[in-house]
Structures are given as structure tokens and as C-alpha cells.
Amino acid sequence: MDMDLLIAHPEWLLLALAPLFFICIALEWWFGVRLRRLPASAQYRPAEVVCNVVLAGMHQLADIIAGLLIAKVYLHFFGWRLFDIEMTLLTFALLIVAQDFCYYWFHRASHRIRWMWAAHVVHHSSENMNFTTAFRQSLMYPLAGMWLFWLPLVVVGFDPNWVVFAVLLNLGLQFFVHTQVIKSLGR
């Protein structure tokens, strides 16, 4: 996929990564069942897998619909940006670090603020922890205010498309921590 097209339409990133996700799910399931490497808390139960995939689809749809409004808010505040940040390899690395900082505070708030927990609890409601659990996302995140945590990046001067791309890239990378096959990533 053309990178410029992906930056212009960052909402397609997770769809572009979907084949990789499904390959990882199939491998985890196949080797987990075949080699019995999955603990009881990581088993693939058909009803839960279907639920997780349906929740992922609903989350994507909610994000696309809400994104139409949120994009307008981001563009409005981008008009008031403090700096004009040109995207280079260095500024992209800075954006990824800044996005991760914002993600930390979003995730912490999602566990501490009841309004946000009401949206986030969907992700923690799975009885099993496997790759499909990463798909278990809430369609209520936009209403809960998730997007507010990345608004400062737009105000600082990062292009809204790049901010959304970084957020979705992080979400895509979060997929890979939802397995019990790999015991530890080390330091």
C-alpha cells in the first residue's frame, strides 16, 4: 500500500494490517492447540472469538463515523497550532514517543475515571487472553473522550493525519502483547 495514501487515510492502517493479525491468530491457535502451549486462560472458544471479531468491526465502524466529527475538531485546533512540524524521521520518532505518552494517560484514565472505564471495561471483559482479545474494543471510546488525549499533539503542530496514523499504529502494535505464547519480551 502506498504510504502517502495511508497517511492521507490513516483509518485504513488497521485494515491493511488485518491479514497479519489473522495470520498471527491462526498460528497462535494452530500451534497452541497442536503443541498444547496455550494455558487454560488463553484457549480459543468459538463464541468468544466471534464476539471479539464482531466488537472489532463495530469499533472500526464507530471510529470511522466519529472520525468524521473528530477530524473537524482536530483540523480546527490545527489551525491554532503552536509550531509547523515538518514530518521527518526524527519528528516521526518524536511523534511516536509523544503519542505513547498520551496513550499512557488515556489508558490510565480509562482505569481510573468511571465514565471512561464504562467504555474500556469491554476490553477487559474477556475470559481468555489470546490474540483475538486485542480485537475486543469498545465502540464507545469516541463518546468517552479518547480522542481528547491526542488533541495536544495537534495543538503542538503535528498534522492530524499523522497523529491518527501514530495512534492507529500504536493500536496495531498493541495487538502483539495480547498473547500468552510468548512468556516475556524481556526488558
Image (tube, rainbow, N blue to C red):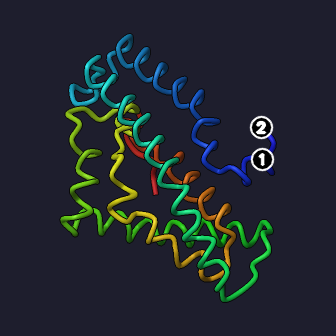
Image height of 78 relative to 64, above or below: below
Image height of 184 relative to 101, above or below: above
The type of residue carrying mark 2 is: Met
How many circles with numbers are drawn on the protein?
Answer: 2
Q: Label 1 near label 2: C-beta < 8 Å?
A: yes
**Residue ID at (78%, 47%):** 5
**Position of residue 140 measured from the top left corner of the image (x, y, whole percent):** 33, 52
Give 51 or 130, whichever is nearer the viewer. Answer: 51
Location of residue 90 by image quarter: bottom right
The label number, if any, that marks residue 5 in the structure image: 1
Q: Provide the secondary structure element on which disc 2 rests.
A: loop
Give 15 or 92, whichever is nearer the viewer. Answer: 15
Disc 2 from disc 1: Cα separation: 8 Å
Tell me the residue that label 2 is attached to: 1
**Residue ID at (34%, 39%):** 136
**Residue ID at (78%, 66%):** 89
The type of residue carrying mark 1 is: Leu
**Position of residue 146 measured from the top left corner of the image (x, y, whole percent):** 40, 63
Crowd class of label 1 (few under 14; some 14 to 19; many from 20; radius 10 Å): few
Q: Residue furthest bottom?
A: 82
Image height of 157 relative to 120, above or below: below
Left or right, residue 116 beside residue 164: left
Does the image show residue 139?
yes
